[in-house]
């Protein structure tokens, strides 16, 4: 029998004024802490003598997580740490008061564990939860403040877990599946694909009230990998909400994430981490340059086959693709200032987007003077937001980047004609009126320093 996961997102917490430091151990090191997503696992219900078992349990969860897509492909983008938080007593509290108490015997017990995790939260037996989120925040702040996502493993053999800012999972039955599901909520804001109740229903990556296959946010996936528009129910409010798949991990244990949820997780990875791990040269050279000038990037490869693609351009002209190194001769440069840019994007088949709001590309730009050498270096992730899409009149474009450089936008028809152009300034929104355009598909190109950094389909309806 399939097991439906349970989740409540709880917003309030008790306040704690004390703090402690604990042993922090790295169990997976993929790269520098500021260039990776840092997942931190905290223990609850493990006594001091049981902390070696916590390290084993955390490693087992980590291995299970990275055996499943899309985490398997993006394993190199994560570091994993554990914080060994000892409890006075072993296990989790079970008051035995929930209305859905299981038929199997789960002992009624009160446990003095550190974070106060307990079953029967909000009258649901499997809802293993703690209201003490501020205590978790304090432990993280004092032991690993640069975390990106944290979760709590509870030393209990009975099925249970919850979502919220810090997902919680027991270490018993289906422990890893529970934890990975809850990470979907907390890390990516995926919705349950069983009906979570009216209070939790909302537009999200994998939940919508849209029923038009041409407009639904996962329209590019429809007809592929069993993606469609499936109603949550046949009656009531639940019948007005739709999910993309019938057996996704966000609904049932033991299944893969559906294509829509995999895509959402990858987009979150791209949002947090640049695929460019390092580049050379990194220093500005004012001395007379020695030719050839050599440039190199190192990227965080995806597994098992690297799906990252790159394009190098000199003064706006593409010169090479999918190479990690480029050599520039003096004869390649014009008199005065020259610009060399490399643009990196992920060409994975797990992404199929043309109507999502945000584009992320990674770039490095070197400004070169053929007599003085390298004058300036800039590396940045550009975040370009274009909405709504589709639209029938107004198109909004917003740019975020630390370089404070202007991005030039061109709307191009499918026959290559530039229909409309504009400039988008950093941290500002630009509004374009496209009401006069004919209905149909257009390409929106984004340029900086004459270099194409992104293209996005635009639907005028």
Image (spheres, helix red, strand yellow):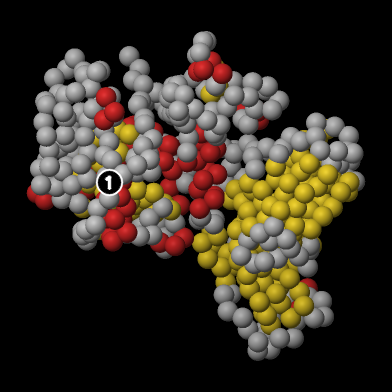
Residue at 54% from the left image edge and 50% from the top image edge: 271
Compared to 111, does 103 lie above or below? above
* Mark 1 burial class by Cα count in 10 Å: few <14, some 14-19, many 20+: few
Instruction: Give percent across and percent down for residue 7.
Output: 36, 30
> 36 and 437: which one is in front?
437
The reply to whether residue 457 is in sight is yes
Q: Quadrant of the N terminus?
A: top left
> 75 and 131: which one is in front?
131
Instruction: Give percent across and percent down for residue 40.
Output: 33, 51
> 359 and 233: which one is in front?
233
Q: Quadrant of the C terminus?
A: top right
Residue at 63% from the left image edge and 36% from the top image edge: 352
Instruction: Give percent across and percent down for residue 217.
Output: 63, 31
Is label 1 in a helix, a strand or a loop? Answer: loop
Direction from residue 148 to residue 416 in the image, left or right: right
Residue at 60% from the left image edge and 48% from the top image edge: 346
Q: Which quadrant of the structure image shows residue 220? A: top right
> 15 and 325: which one is in front?
15
Direction from residue 372 to residue 46 in the image, left or right: left
Q: Residue furthest top?
A: 234
Direction from residue 160 to residue 146 in the image, left or right: right
Question: Residue tagged by mark 1?
Answer: 14
């Amino acid at each position: 029998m399939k097991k439906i996961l349970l989740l409540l997102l709880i917003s309030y917490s008790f306040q704690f004024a004390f703090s402690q430091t604990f042993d922090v151990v790295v169990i997976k090191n993929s790269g520098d802490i500021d260039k990776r997503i840092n997942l931190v696992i905290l223990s609850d219900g493990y006594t001091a003598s049981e902390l070696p078992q916590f390290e084993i349990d955390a490693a087992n969860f980590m291995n299970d997580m990275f055996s499943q897509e899309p985490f398997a492909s993006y394993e190199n983008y994560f570091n994993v740490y554990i914080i060994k938080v000892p409890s006075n007593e072993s296990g989790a509290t079970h008051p035995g008061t929930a209305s859905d108490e299981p038929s199997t015997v789960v002992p009624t017990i009160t446990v003095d564990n550190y974070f106060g995790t307990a079953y029967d939260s909000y009258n649901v037996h499997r809802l293993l939860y703690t209201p003490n989120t501020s205590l978790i925040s304090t432990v993280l702040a004092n032991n690993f403040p640069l975390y990106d996502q944290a979760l709590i493993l509870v030393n209990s053999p009975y099925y249970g877990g919850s979502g919220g800012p810090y997902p919680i999972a027991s270490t018993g039955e289906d422990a890893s599946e529970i934890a990975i599901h809850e990470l979907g909520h907390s890390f990516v804001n995926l919705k349950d694909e069983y009906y979570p109740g009216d209070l939790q229903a909302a537009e999200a990556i994998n939940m919508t009230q849209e029923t038009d296959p041409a407009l639904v946010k996962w329209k590019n996936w429809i007809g592929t990998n069993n993606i469609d528009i499936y109603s949550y129910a046949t009656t009531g409010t639940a019948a007005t909400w739709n999910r993309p798949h019938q057996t996704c991990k966000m609904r049932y244990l033991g299944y893969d994430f559906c294509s829509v949820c995999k895509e959402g997780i990858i987009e979150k990875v791209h949002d947090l981490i640049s695929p460019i791990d390092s580049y050379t040269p990194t220093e500005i050279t004012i001395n007379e340059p020695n030719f050839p000038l050599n440039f190199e990037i190192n990227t965080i490869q995806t597994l098992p086959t690297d799906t990252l693609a790159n394009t190098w351009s000199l003064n706006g002209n593409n010169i090479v693709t999918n190479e990690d190194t480029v050599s520039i001769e003096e004869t390649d440069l014009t008199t005065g200032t020259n610009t060399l840019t490399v643009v990196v994007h992920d060409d994975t088949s797990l992404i199929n987007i043309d109507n999502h709001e945000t584009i992320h590309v990674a770039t490095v730009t070197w400004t070169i003077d053929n007599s003085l050498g390298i004058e300036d270096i800039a590396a940045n992730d550009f975040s370009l937001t274009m909405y709504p899409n589709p639209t029938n009149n107004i198109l909004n474009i917003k740019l975020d980047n630390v370089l404070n450089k202007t991005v030039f936008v061109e709307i191009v028809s499918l026959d290559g004609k530039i229909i409309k152009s504009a400039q988008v300034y950093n941290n500002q929104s630009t509004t374009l009126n496209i009401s006069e355009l004919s209905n149909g598909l257009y390409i929106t190109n984004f340029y900086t320093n004459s270099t194409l950094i992104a293209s996005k389909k635009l639907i005028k309806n």
